Image (cartoon, helix red, strand yellow):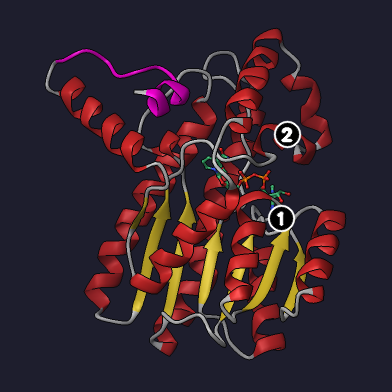
Amino acid sequence: MDLRGKTAVITGGASGIGLATAKKFAASGANLVLGDIEDAPLAVAVAELRADGAKVVGVQGDVALEADVIAMREAALAEFGAAHVVFNNAGVAGGLTIGTPKKIWDWVLSVNLDGVINGVNAFVPLFLEQNEGHVINTASEAGLVGVAGMGPYCASKFAVVGLSESLFHELAMTGKNVNVSVLCPNFVRTRIHESERNMPSELVSYNENPMAEVARRIAKDAVNSGIDPADVARAVEDAVVNNRFWILTHEHSALRITELRLEWMRGGPSPMATLWSASES
Ligand SMILES: NC(=O)c1ccc[n+]([C@@H]2O[C@H](COP(=O)([O-])OP(=O)(O)OC[C@H]3O[C@@H](n4cnc5c(N)ncnc54)[C@H](O)[C@@H]3O)[C@@H](O)[C@H]2O)c1
């Protein structure tokens, strides 16, 4: 798809990978709807993009809520008369696998998985009707291999990979010009390690345990050693323009962890326990 004159809706568009992709898409001539739960950073992002000449509107909303994602689609239709790309990208991280209260699991799954489900439900019927559209779902390398200390996040990201593969096959069966990509990065320098800024306030007390604090510190160092979000944005645009399903920004580690899982299934040793060891192997 040539993005010039097309309209893209990006969730989690006020920060990190979403914002970098918004800048990239705008430079390629796309109209933008940025959805985000954080009002103030969203207003700043919209103002910056407009100052650079982009046609962009911001919609504050929570991707876990179906009505909020529908409102993002309706904003695209009202402002630009169409929607052609949806980047279901908003996400949060939090919680170990052992000892994490169900409410934290629910929060992570509601944003990372329900957010993608709501995006697919809101946009795919429209794309099929107009016989044009591209869905990008943000998963992670944590959706390709289970890692220590990230149970809720891994569960949500494995689900996004599975959902995206199913969607790929169903779209192929329709014979329509509607496509899907799944984004599986290793670490990227963003604010993902500060996800708790968006945690519902009633959950904060559930999150205060010493192990979670250790995990947060390790995640911060790993994220800060990651690649630039602009590199991810380039890979996302390339997948839309050239219609590629897998977006493996760290191709070496993504392929290596997948090979190691296969060896494990065949009776070999279990693969590395952490994503940072994946990037080093
Ligand atoms: N940074 C990494 O190392 C990395 C690696 C793999 C995958 N990812 C994924 O990339 C995606 C983008 O994250 P990022 O790294 O840019 O982090 P980020 O924190 O910089 O950006 C995430 C954005 O999502 C927004 N958001 C959070 N909850 C929301 C909700 N309920 N509704 C709407 N918006 C919400 C935040 O306000 C923020 O603007 C996430 O899905 C994340 O899981 C990140």
Instruction: Pick out the residue farthest to the top.
Output: 210
The segment highlighted magenta reads: 268-280
Position of residue 137 in the picture relative to residue 198 (left or right): left
- Against 1, residue 281 (above or below) is above
Distance of mark 1 from mark 2, alpha carbons?
Answer: 17 Å
Confirm if mark 2 falls within 8 A of ligand 1: yes
- Tell me which label, 1 or 2, sits earlier in the chain: 1
Q: Where is mark 2, residue-wise?
A: 194
Rendering quarter of residue 135:
bottom left
In what element is the residue under mark 2? helix
In what element is the residue under mark 1? loop
- Against 193, residue 89 (above or below) is below
Q: Position of residue 162 (x, y in %)?
A: 34, 48
Q: Position of residue 216 (x, y in %)?
A: 66, 21
Confirm if mark 1 falls within 8 A of ligand 1: yes
Neighbourhood count class around disc 1 (C-alpha, 10 Å): few under 14, some 14–19, many 20 upward: many
The foreground one among 125 and 253 is 253
Is residue 167 covered in magenta?
A: no
Q: Position of residue 155 (x, y in %)?
A: 46, 34
Q: Where is mark 1, residue-wise?
A: 62
The amino acid pointed to by label 2 is Glu
The foreground one among 2 and 108 is 2
- Against 262, residue 148 (above or below) is above
Rendering quarter of residue 99:
top right
Position of residue 105 in the picture relative to residue 239 (left or right): right
Is label 1 or label 2 in front? 2
